[in-house]
Image (cartoon, rainbow, N blue to C red):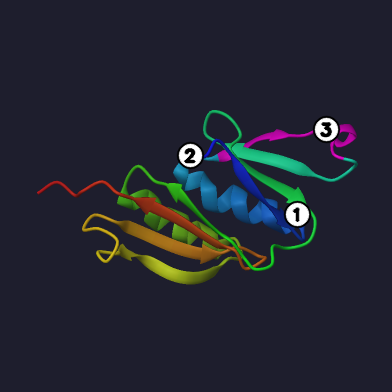
């Protein structure tokens, strides 16, 4: 439904360190940096798997903070996202686990990025019996 989205970050270097590490277990990486002549000199980068779909641009931090959830192929990726996000300077906002109040197979984890945005990895795949 949504083709792409993004957010403003107050410190691009900190944000890049965080997102490079946290999104790597989900096979998401920085794919593109917009040339500065097209951005008025601001840094703008796009993350994705095959094409940029999540954008960061240098500016003021989001007020209020926002929530983005990224898909994971399996629960191990959710666990790895959480660990990588914490190691990269994020803060815990919900350890990996089932959130059955959403649906029985909702397995997610939440980490706040350096600006306080709630970043999530989620897997909806049932565990084989």
Identify the residue shown where x is 69% and y is 48%: 56
Q: On the image, which quarter does residue 4 sit in?
A: top right
For label 3, the SS is loop
Query: Earlier along the polypeptide chain: callout 2 or callout 3?
Result: 2
Specify whether 125 is left or right of 14: left
Q: On the image, which quarter does residue 35 sit in?
A: top right
Identify the residue shown where x is 66% and y is 65%: 114
Q: Which mark is on residue 27?
A: 2
Specify whether 127 is left or right of 119: left
Q: Which mark is on residue 83?
A: none
For label 2, the SS is loop
Q: Which residue lies furthest to the front in this view?
A: 1
- Mark in the foreground, 2 or 3: 3
Specify whether 82 is left or right of 129: right
Identify the residue shown where x is 65% and y is 68%: 64
Measured along the vertical axis of the image, is residue 35 above or below residue 122?
above
- Please rate how many residues cluster around mark 1, counting C-alpha atoms within 10 Å: few if below 14, some from 14 to 19, many from 20: few
Residue beneath disc 1: 13
Q: Looking at the image, which is closer to me, 72 or 89?
A: 72
Measured along the vertical axis of the image, is residue 87 above or below residue 124?
below
State yes or no: residue 100 in magenta. no
The segment highlighted magenta reads 29-39
- Please rate how many residues cluster around mark 2, counting C-alpha atoms within 10 Å: few if below 14, some from 14 to 19, many from 20: few
Residue beneath disc 3: 35
In percent of width and height, residue 47 lies at 61, 40
């Amino acid at each position: 439904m949504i083709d792409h989205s993004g957010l403003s970050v107050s410190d691009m270097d900190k944000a890049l360190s965080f997102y490079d590490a946290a999104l790597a277990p989900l096979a998401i990486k920085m794919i593109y940096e917009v040339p500065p002549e097209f951005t008025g000199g601001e840094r703008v980068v796009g993350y994705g798997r095959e094409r940029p779909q999540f954008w960061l641009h240098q500016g003021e931090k989001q007020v209020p903070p926002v929530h983005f959830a990224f898909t994971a192929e399996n629960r191990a990726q959710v666990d790895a996202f959480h660990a990588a996000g914490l190691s990269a300077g994020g803060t815990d906002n919900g350890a990996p686990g089932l959130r059955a109040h959403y649906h029985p197979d909702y397995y997610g984890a939440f980490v706040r990025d350096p600006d306080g945005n709630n970043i999530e990895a989620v897997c909806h795949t049932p565990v084989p019996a």
